[in-house]
Each structure stands twice: as structure tokens, then as C-alpha cells.
Amino acid sequence: MKTTLIFAAVLTAAVAVSGAASAQKTEEVGQNPYGGLHWSVAAPEGASWALQCQFAPVTVRGIHMNRINHTGTGRMAGRLPGDNGSCRLTKTGGEGGVGVAIVKNGAATAAGTNDPAKPAVINVF
């Protein structure tokens, strides 16, 4: 499985240049960057998928970020850095459907899809 982080450095630089840097506040999450909401992807028949989750900007060891991307097949789980977020799961191939869930305050919010053209989307705020 491939895991990549997309950093918001370009966005932060653009905001700073526009003079709105004071409006762009990031939270330093330090040594526990993924201590927030739990997320889980399931693809019980082995379908491949791409997950993109966005969240309020945070700083992890000096690096500004506001999203994570994961790709894979089958099951994968992790945590977001905070208590709010939005995830979009797209089926990229294989048999069967894919689903994503986010847990906040003990309650799961879930969505799924069988159609690569219609991603499953969850917003938890």
C-alpha cells in the first residue's frame, strides 16, 4: 500500500503573500500527529481504492498540512490529526464495493460505493 502526505506549504505561502496569513491559523500537533478521529476503509472483495481526507490545517514537526492521501486494496485504518474532517473514497478497480467510516464521539459515520465515478464522501464536523 502506498501512503503519501500532501502538504499545504504552497497554500500557506499563497495565503501569506496575499496578506491573509493571520487568518490562516495552524495547530501544532507535535509528536502525536494522528491522535484524532479514527477512520477505516473496507473493500471485502479486494477492490482497489484511493482515499483523500482533508482537515483543519495542522503543523506536524514544523510541516504544515491539511490533507492525507492513501491508496490500497482491501482494508486499511488510521487516524486524522484532529476531531473534524472530510474524507472522499474512490473505487479505482477490482471486484466489489468499497466503504469508509469515521468515528467521532463513539458514533460512526459511513459511506460506500460500487461506482468509480461516484466517490463515497463523509463530512464530520
Image: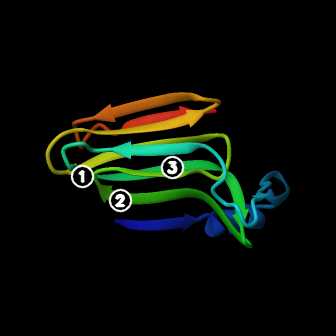
Residue contact between numbered discs 1 and 3, judged by CB atoms under 8 Å = no
Q: State the image coordinates of residue 90 (x, y, percent, origin top left).
A: 32, 46
Residue at the (74%, 73%) spot, across then down: 62
SS at mark 1?
strand
Residue 115 occupies which quadrant of the picture? top left
Label 1 sits on what residue type? Thr
Spot the residue most to the left.
Answer: 95
35 vs 17: above or below: above
Identified at 29% across, 37% down, the residue is 118
Distance between mark 2 and mark 3 Cα atoms: 12 Å
User: Identity of the amino acid at label 2?
Assistant: Thr
Q: Badge 2 is on which residue?
A: 71
Residue found 77% across the figure and 54% down from its top: 24
The answer to whether the residue labelled 2 contacts the one labelled 1, judged by CB atoms less than 8 Å apart, is: yes
Q: State the CA–CA distance, disc 1 to disc 3.
A: 16 Å
Relative horizontal placement of residue 21, taking residue 54 as reference (left or right)? right
Q: Provide the residue designation for mark 3.
A: 53
The crowding category of the residue bearing disc 2, from other C-alpha atoms within 10 Å (few below 14, some 14 to 19, many at least 20), is: some
Image check: 86 left or right of 96? right
State which quarter of the image contains the C terminus: top right
Dot 2: element: strand
Counting residues from the start of the chain, the first of labels 2 and 3 encountered is 3
Task: Look at 59% across and 42% down and name the residue there.
Answer: 85
Indicate whether 24 appears above or below 8.
above
The residue to which callout 1 is attached is 92
Nearest the eye: 32 or 67? 32
- Name the residue at the right extreme: 22
Residue 15 position in % (x across, y down):
72, 61
Relative to 13, does residue 108 appear above or below in the rendering?
A: above
